[in-house]
Image (spheres, coloured by chain):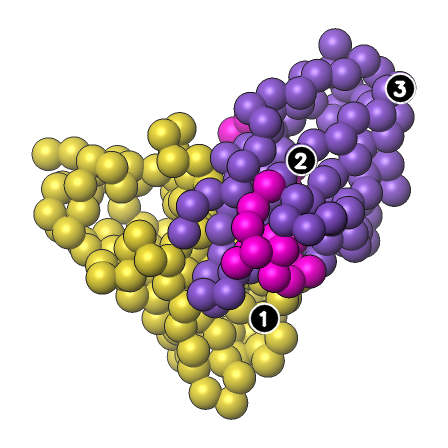
Chain colours: A yellow, B purple
Amino acid sequence: QVQLQQSGPGLVKPSQTLSLTCAISGDSVFSNSAAWNWIRQSPSRGLEWLGRTYYRSKWYNEYAVSVKSRIIINPDTSKNQFSLHLNSLTPEDTAVYYCGRDLNAGVDSWGQGTLVTVSS
Amino acid sequence: QSALTQPASVSGSPGQSITLSCTGTSSDVGAYNYVSWYQQHPGKAPKLMIYDVSNRPSGVSNRFSGSKSGNTASLTISGLQAEDEADYYCSSYTTSSTVVFGGGTKLTVL
């Protein structure tokens, strides 16, 4: 059974970069059937898909238009994990951030969620 | 990419059947059979209930069923139970190779 363990800061200052990591157990970041997603949730924006990375003989990334200029999602193959980097943060980026696995059939496994507050 | 449209709230009595709707466009819901539904209880991560419009993951009750017509997907919960009270979200893959969520529906079991 796959488990996803998130780590990263809960408080980030405006204009800085948020970096979160999602460690995978029970599956491989190299899986040819999985995609590794970041999703966030806030009262004002609801659930918002941010992007994903996946391996199909080479690495692919797909990002939401709303954050495309500010986001990078990276696999870390040596540690079987993937990360989110979101820069130029504003208070609007305050949300609970989730990582999740998608087997091309919905996100079936979720991380525990990380509440990220953007404040000085 | 605009969010999919879901009613803000729905209510039903125990034992009843209710249907939640999720309306998109020909660029998302209408384009593919890649609609998913999630259940979320307060303080918890979402749980996948339906994928690919009408398929149930292992372990999900057969009281939950999904369908789609045109640009609108639906989730039906039959034999409503108190434990079904939660927020429900739909999502769809889009023609832009992105994923879009609905705004969510709060289900109240009376």
Which residue corresponds to mark 2? B21
Residue B56 appears in view: yes
Which one is nearer the viewer's eye here, B19 or A3? B19
Residue A109 in sight: no
Q: CA distance from mark 2 to mark 3?
A: 20 Å
1 vs 3, front mark: 3
Residue A83 in the image: state x and y as whole percent.
36, 63
Asked if badge 2 and badge 3 are on a common chain, one would say yes
Chain of the residue displaying label 3: B
| Magenta residues (range) | B23-47
* Quadrant in which the C terminus of chain B is drawn: top right
| Mark 2 vs mark 1, CA separation in Å | 28 Å
Residue B40 within the magenta-colored segment of the rendering: yes
Residue behind mark 3: B15
Q: Which residue is mark 1?
A: A34
Image mark 2: chain: B
